[in-house]
Amino acid sequence: MMKNRFFLALYSFFFSTFTIGLISFVTFETNYSLLMGSFGATMVLIFGFPESPFSQPKNIFFGHLITSLVGILTYKYIFLSISIVIALSVGLGIFFMILFNVTHPPAGGNAIIIIL
């Protein structure tokens, strides 16, 4: 059991380091800003708990896409206090992820990251 946990931890370390390193490289060496704080938590799910429903490709892709779009749209079109816009963005992001059955918990932070 401990041996399996060690290899899972090693696997997670290697591939999360590589993935975040690649995204960081693209972000800092090009004009494409792809790096977001929520991706760190996504790496935990993808590489540490790959069987989790939250770790499935459709959940990761559409969860991040939906919450990012919600963050952009609420920031651009809702003219209220920033704290209200952030709260609405997170709530709406969660609403749409659950509605479309693509819940990915780390993506819940995207709206906050985008608005700030």
Image: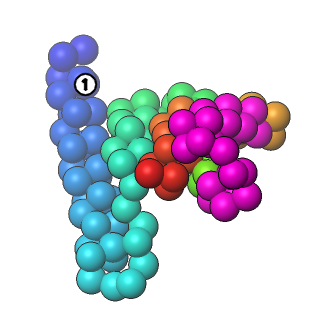
The answer to if 16 sits in the magenta stretch is no
The residue positioned 28% from the left and 41% from the top of the image is 12
7 horizontally vs 30: left or right = left
Q: Is residue 98 above or below residue 36?
A: above
Q: Position of residue 61 (x, y in %)?
A: 60, 53
Does residue 70 appear anywhere in the picture? no
The answer to if 73 sits in the magenta stretch is yes
The residue positioned 66% from the left and 61% from the top of the image is 76
Q: Position of residue 29 (x, y in %)?
A: 27, 83
Q: Is residue 113 above or below residue 41?
A: below
79 horizontally vs 110: left or right = right
Question: What quarter of the picture does the N terminus occupy?
Answer: top left
Does residue 92 appear anywhere in the picture? yes
> Quadrant of the rendered structure where residue 48 is?
top left
The residue positioned 38% from the left and 38% from the top of the image is 41
18 horizontally vs 84: left or right = left
Residue farthest along the top direction in this orientation = 1
Q: Give SS at disc 1.
A: helix
Q: Position of residue 31 (x, y in %)?
A: 39, 84
Q: Which residues are magenta?
A: 72-97
Q: Residues within 10 Å of mark 1 (few under 14, many from 20)?
A: few
* Residue beneath disc 1: 4
Q: Position of residue 78 (x, y in %)?
A: 72, 51
